[in-house]
Each structure stands twice: as structure tokens, then as C-alpha cells.
Amino acid sequence: LDLTLKNKVADMGLAEWGNKDMQLSELEMPGLMASRAKYGPEKPLAGLKVMGSLHMTIQTAMLIETLKELGADLRWASCNIFSTQDHAAAAIAANESSAVFAWKGETLEEYWWCTEMALTWPDGSGPDLIVDDGGDATMLIHEGVKAEKDPSLLDREPSNAEEKCFLDRLKAAYKVDPQKWTKMAAKIKGVSEETTTGVHRLYQLEAAGELLFPAINVNDSVTKSKFDNLYGCQESLADGIKRATDIMLAGKVVVVFGYGDVGKGCARSMRGYGARVMVTEIDPICALQAAMEGFEVVTMEDAVGKGDIFVTCTGNYHVITGADMEKMKDEAIVCNIGHFDNEIDMAYLESDEGCTCLNIKPQVDKWTLNSGRSIIVLAEGRLVNLGCATGHPSFVMSNSFTNQTLAQIELATGNYDVKVYTLSKKMDEEVARLHLERLSVKLTTLTKEQADYISVPVEGPYKAEHYRY
Ligand code: NAI
């Protein structure tokens, strides 16, 4: 690592555009702007080093500048090789709001280099706090600590190209300092995690007794997963598919895999365009929800020969296999909006000798299969909304990132054990409250008698912990 390097972005010439775009987001991000006004003067993050591994978009740039205003000393990388908006990265670098190592179209080697650069301050020290999305920064530290305890782990045979790049990065770090990650982990006050997949990894670490620092699960704030995952994907899925292919959605058969928060948004979006939507599920509750919303709930077997567009939203592994792709209609579109690309068996396409690739444009590939038919794969199987479009709109990200801001303040100022926490319902309601005025929402105030009757305080929280929204 060259720690004298202040930033690495695609093109600093894009900074002015990035700043104009950020300015346009201000009105749409009332939660973040209110957080700046409320906590900016107190500077609760003063003296703290904050590392971010989260899609380097305009919305994230707004989060970064909020954390900066709260006093943080920041370094940032993207959590996906395709999700950086180069003008956002350039603006952050030019404004010196954070050191930033991110550009659209990183290789996997570069990706892990960027992550380690963002985790390593010029004096060699690590962060006090992490903002993670998908858990890659957290994983690098945890795997690094494991390897420092047992260096033979570094010599294991990688199962794929991705793991090879990851191991190479760990080996390089070990050569420079065989205690790097152990020292880093010992200093970390906590991580706030953005997404379902990252949260899943955190609970796995906690259950195994391997979690090394406190964590806040931001995803499961109601004002995150029931908004970003749902309404965000409802808009950004279509944006990704349209920018990539210009396909007419009305009348097409769209198969949505998984009917969780993301799947619900995706299915509703496609129906809104007039597509005929099929859903697959493994969970009877979600399957019943889908059916009662009027979607046809089917299996892959039923759907594979009928679908024109396939969208994976499960956070699971190999939901679309090579054998499935071989059965699809000619020029079916295949994409994923879940966090990792392994929802689709991309390795089948890339390793099988019978499949050939024709690149149409960046992040759009036409693969010809052994069936003699072709499929169009978007963003190489990575999150289509961030790879082929610009992710969710600012307004919904303001909800997510206000939760992130509150989580960072909590970790900085609170005394947390090494466990996974969620934010309080009071904070969740506060995040929502900050977004009402922009939509001209008028809230009804409880009378004291009404509040007593339903046993809640007049000023909230209004729901019991077990309420599911
Ligand atoms: P969720 O847990 O609410 O939903 C996933 C659903 O998939 C569940 O209902 C589950 O039963 C179902 N499922 C699991 N395996 C399946 C299989 N083999 N076939 C059919 N259904 C299956 O999770 P959520 O919040 O909807 O997130 C899904 C993924 O999307 C995660 O990886 C998450 O990190 C990611 N995400 C992506 C965003 C984006 O902007 N692209 C935004 C938010 C989340």
C-alpha cells in the first residue's frame, strides 16, 4: 500500500458536476440535513476515524459530508466494483471530505486494495468506527485476525477467483505487518451495517462467538428495510433494466426470485409497468403474501421457459443455475438485485467451454449457451440497480443514512458490548418524522386520553417491539 496516496478516483475533472448533483440532493435528503444542523455544532465524532465500505454514490457522498460535519476523519471505498459514481467520488476527493479509493469498474484485486487503503490511515493506524454495506470491511478484518492467529490459513486453495484476490490481499498485508488486523480490531468501537446480507454475516459471527467488536444492524430499522429495500428497489430495478436494455416491460413475463422486502418492491414495480409477474419463494408466509397480492407463485421449473426477465432478490446462493440458464428463452434478460453476484451461477457461464460472451456495452453481456440460445446478463450478475443505474433515489437513502448517522453517534458515544444491536424505536420514529414535511404529511397528535387508552406515551414510541409494520 502506498499510504502517501491521498485518493484514487477515475477523473477529478468530474468534481464540479458531483458537487452540483449533491446540491440537488439536499432538499431530497431532509434527514441528513437535519442531522447536520442538530449534531454539527456538538461534533460527536470529533477525533474519531471513520472508514466506509459503501457504494460511492451521490447519496453516499451526502452521508460522508454529514459525518464530516459531525467531526469525523474519514476514508472511503465502494462495496461493489461497479457501483461507484465517478462524479461523486471526485467531488468527495476535491472537497477533502474524505480520502476516497473508488471508481466504476474496479477489478477484484483493485477492489480489495481500495478496501484496505480505506482501512489504513497514513500513520498505519486503523479506524475507530466502520460504516459497512454487505460486510466486506468487517470480513477482511475478521479473516485477517484469524489468519494472524493461524498463518497456514493463508495457504489454503482458493475456491474461485474472488477468494484468490481476497487471500492475496491478506497475504500482502501479513508480509508488511503480521499483527495488522489484530491491532486494528482491538481499537474498533463498532460497525454499523447497512444491508440484509451484511447483517446476516454479523449474526453468524455473533452466534459463533467470533464477533470482535460491537455492531449496529441498521438494515432492520423499520425506516431502512421497509423503505430502502422496498420502495428503493421499486424504482431502481426498473431504472437498471431500462438503462441497460431499453426493453419494453409491459406484457413481458418477469420472474422475481424471493418475496422479502426487496422482492416485494421489485414485483410491484414490474407489475406497475404492465409486466406479468411470477414470484418464487421458499417461505410459506412470503409465498402467501405474494399470492394474496395477486402474483402467480411458481417454481423455477414452471417459470424457466416462460420468463422474459429474471430478477434474483434472495440474498441466497445459486438461485439461478447453469442448467436453468440453458432452458431459458432466447435473449431472456437475467439480473440480480441481491447483494452478491453468486445468486446467479456466473461461474457456469465463465468456466464452461460451451458458453461464449459478446459484450454489448459496459455491464451488458450477451452469453450464447450450449442450448444455442442466448441470454442477456446485466452487471455480470452484480446488483443491477447500482451496476446499470445509479442505485436508489436520494429521498429513500436519506432514511437509510439518517439511521447510519445515528448508529455512528451511538457507537461513538455509547458503551456497547460485543454484540449486534438495533437502534431504538424512538430513533426509528424520529428518522421517519424528519421525512414527513418534504412530503407535506400532516401527523395527528394523540390526546392524553387516547394515549392512555392504547398505553403509549403521547410523544411515542407508538408501537411495541413485536409490532411488524
Ligand atoms: P429478505 O430476507 O427480506 O428477503 C429474501 C427472501 O428470499 C426471503 O423471503 C426468503 O425466504 C427468500 N428466499 C431465500 N432463498 C430463496 C430461494 N432459493 N428461492 C426463492 N426465494 C428464496 O431480504 P431483503 O431485505 O429483501 O434483501 C435481499 C437481498 O437484497 C440481500 O442480499 C440484501 O442485502 C440485498 N439488498 C439489495 C439492495 C439493492 O439496492 N440492490 C437494497 C437492499 C437489500
Image (tube, helix red, strand yellow):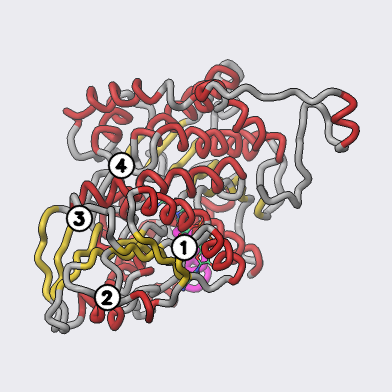
Q: Is residue 228 above or below residue 440?
A: below
The three-letter amino acid code for the residue at tag 2 is Ala
Q: Is mark 3 within 8 Å of ligand 1?
A: no
Q: Which mark is residue 390?
A: 4
Calculate the distance from the C-alpha at mark 2 to the C-alpha at mark 3. Answer: 16 Å
Which residue corresponds to the image point at 35% horizontal and 44% vertical from the top-left?
A: 391
For disc 4, the neighbor class at 10 Å (few under 14, some 14 to 19, many from 20) is many
The three-letter amino acid code for the residue at tag 3 is Gln
Q: Nearer the viewer, residue 342 or 465?
A: 465
Q: Earlier in the sequence, mark 4 or mark 3?
A: 3
Question: What kind of element bears circle 2?
Answer: helix
Q: Is residue 404 above or below residue 18?
A: below
Residue 148 in sight: yes
Q: Earlier in the sequence, mark 2 or mark 1?
A: 1
Calculate the distance from the C-alpha at mark 2 to the C-alpha at mark 1. Answer: 31 Å
Residue placed under numbered mark 2 in the picture: 347
Magenta segment: does it hold 140? Answer: yes
Q: Which mark is residue 363?
A: 3
Calculate the distance from the C-alpha at mark 1 to the C-alpha at mark 3. Answer: 30 Å
Question: What kind of element bears circle 3?
Answer: loop
To which quarter of the image does residue 408 belong?
A: top right
Task: Say whether residue 362 is left or right of residue 402.
Answer: left
Q: Earlier in the sequence, mark 4 or mark 1?
A: 1
The three-letter amino acid code for the residue at tag 1 is Phe
Q: Which mark is residue 295?
A: 1
Label 3 near label 1: C-beta < 8 Å?
Answer: no
Q: Earlier in the sequence, mark 1 or mark 3?
A: 1
Question: What kind of element bears circle 1?
Answer: loop
For the magenta stretch, what is the residue range?
A: 139-150
